[in-house]
Image: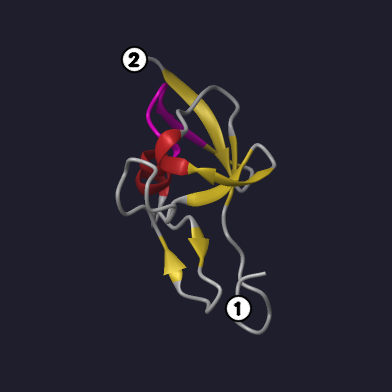
């Protein structure tokens, strides 16, 4: 498997081609994919697309399943942001 470059919040990260976005997020940092409506951090749980805890923004499209999306060259992932009040937008 060849190494490719993906971007997490515009930061280049080298990963193996074909690993899941969820795995890439874990390799690159804390694995956080989103915040719940109450502001709690969320990360992948089931790893098979059932729980939807891994929803994140991939290539500008919100609510994509990180556990089901393979990494390809140039993929762009946006880390979740908390609103000023501490609750996810």
Circle 2 residue: 1
At mark 2, the secondary structure is: loop
Tell which of 70 and 6 is nearer to you: 70
Find the magenta span and give its range. 13-21
Q: Give me the residue at 60% from left, 81% from top.
A: 86
Could you tell which of marks 1 and 2 lies nearer the N-terminus? 2
Percent from the top left, x then y, of residue 69? 47, 33
Which of the 4 quarters of the picture holds residue 32?
bottom left
Q: Is residue 6 magenta?
A: no
Residue 64 appears left or right of 50: right
Percent from the top left, x then y, of residue 24? 41, 39
Circle 1 residue: 87
Q: Residues within 10 Å of mark 1 (few under 14, many from 20)?
A: some
Tell which of 48 and 34 is nearer to you: 48
Q: Which mark, by number, is residue 18?
A: none
Q: Give me the residue at 39% from left, 15% from top.
A: 2
- Extreme-front residue of the structure: 50
- Extreme-left residue of the structure: 46
Percent from the top left, x then y, of residue 63? 58, 49
Residue 19 appears left or right of 5: left
Q: CA distance from mark 1 to mark 2?
A: 39 Å
At mark 1, the secondary structure is: loop
Q: Give me the residue at 65% from left, 36% from top.
A: 59
From the image, which quarter does the N terminus lie in?
Answer: top left
The answer to whether the residue labelled 1 contacts the one labelled 2, judged by CB atoms less than 8 Å apart, is no
From the image, which quarter does the C terminus lie in?
Answer: bottom right
């Amino acid at each position: 498997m060849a190494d490719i470059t993906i971007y997490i919040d515009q930061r280049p990260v080298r990963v193996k081609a074909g690993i899941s976005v969820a795995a890439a997020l874990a390799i690159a940092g804390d694995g956080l994919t989103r915040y719940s409506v109450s502001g709690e951090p969320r990360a992948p749980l089931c790893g098979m697309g059932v729980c939807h805890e891994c929803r994140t923004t991939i290539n500008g499209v919100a609510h994509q399943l990180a556990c089901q999306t393979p990494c390809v060259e140039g993929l762009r992932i946006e880390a979740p942001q908390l609103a000023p009040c501490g609750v996810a937008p």
